[in-house]
Image (spheres, rainbow, N blue to C red):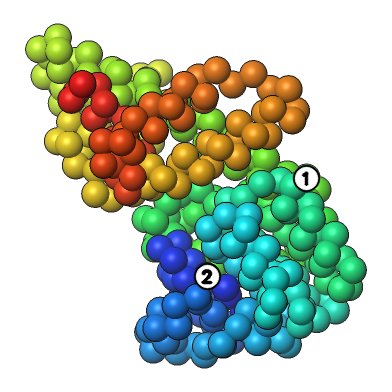
Amino acid sequence: MSRVAWIGLGVMGYPMAGHIKSKGGHDVVVYNRTGAKAEEWAAEFGGTTAATPAEAADGAEFVFSCVGNDDDLRAVTIGPDGAFGTLGQGAVFVDNTTASADVARELDAAAREKGAAFLDAPVSGGQAGAENGVLTVMAGGEQATFDRAAPVIACYARAVNLLGPAGAGQLTKMVNQICIAGLVQGLSEGLHFANRAGLDVAEVIATISKGAAQSWQMENRWETMIDDDFEHGFAVDWMRKDLGICLDEARRNGANLPVTALVDQFYSEVQKMGGRRWDTSSLIARLEHD
């Protein structure tokens, strides 16, 4: 059993921290910007709360974070009362935020200066994956650091892989989001076409989902997509943030992402339709309601 600090109790972080406490049996202290959420978590799982990230990290062997973006991440790590202020020598900081590779490398260097270690470890699987403890975790960092942290990460994951040095986890998450963006647009167009062609969409999906067109999105989202039900899942605002990170990185490394750039603009149209918090499968809405 390890002393673990968790920073950030949003829709992902709340259940992820819970799995570390309930499955792993670790001693967990949590910090959240809204203190009431931390108190709620502690009452549910039996952990304790801290008033600042620095207080949470003090004495912890492992410190986890799951916050919004690069700026949020810097605030809870190297900002005033940030976790790096008390991060102990030999401690491991694991960041589950989807952020840039640059900030991952920046925090890796800052952790090394403290005699600590860092993993960038973004996740895939959405809110359902977090709640069920079956996320996929893409890590960047040193092998020895990964080997220490992997058993704790496994409390909320079904796949935990090291992809390379600091930043590699974030770069892999970018690949993940690039692939999903194009796939959801293709599925949206396929369902839209089936509707306009007068086909029985359920029969179409039952047939093509057994072949090469099959995907997680098809299996899990086709029904809600044709029902105009988007009040669930991974929000459009979050996807646009992620695609922005992908496109920024592509400008640096020279990658050509024409479909990703186009789908990002399609998501901006969904936002204008009032779909900022809709699931990413809402791309079909701009086709069905044009």
Q: Residues within 10 Å of mark 2 (few under 14, many from 20)?
A: many
Q: Position of residue 233 (x, y in %)?
A: 33, 49
Disc 2 target residue: 8
Q: Amino acid at mark 2?
A: Gly
Q: Which quarter of the rendering shows the C terminus?
A: top left
Q: Amino acid at mark 1?
A: Gly
Q: Position of residue 115 (x, y in %)?
A: 89, 73
> Which residue lies at the image location 71% right of the left edge and 86% below the top edge?
58
Q: Position of residue 228 (x, y in %)?
A: 17, 36
Disc 1 target residue: 164
> Which residue lies at the image location 68% right of the left edge and 63% below the top edge?
74
Q: Quarter of the image holding residue 109? A: bottom right
- Mark 1 or 2: in front is 2
> Which residue lies at the image location 30% right of the left edge and 24% below the top edge?
188
**Which secondary structure lies at badge 1?**
strand
When the figure is inspected, residue 84 is found, relative to residue 42, above or below; the finding is: above
**Which secondary structure lies at badge 2?**
loop
117 lies left or right of 2: right
The answer to whether residue 129 is seen in the rendering is: yes
The answer to whether residue 221 is seen in the rendering is: no
Q: Are marks 1 and 2 in contact (CB under 8 Å)?
A: no
**Cα–Cα span, label 1 and label 2:** 25 Å
Q: Residues within 10 Å of mark 1 (few under 14, many from 20)?
A: some
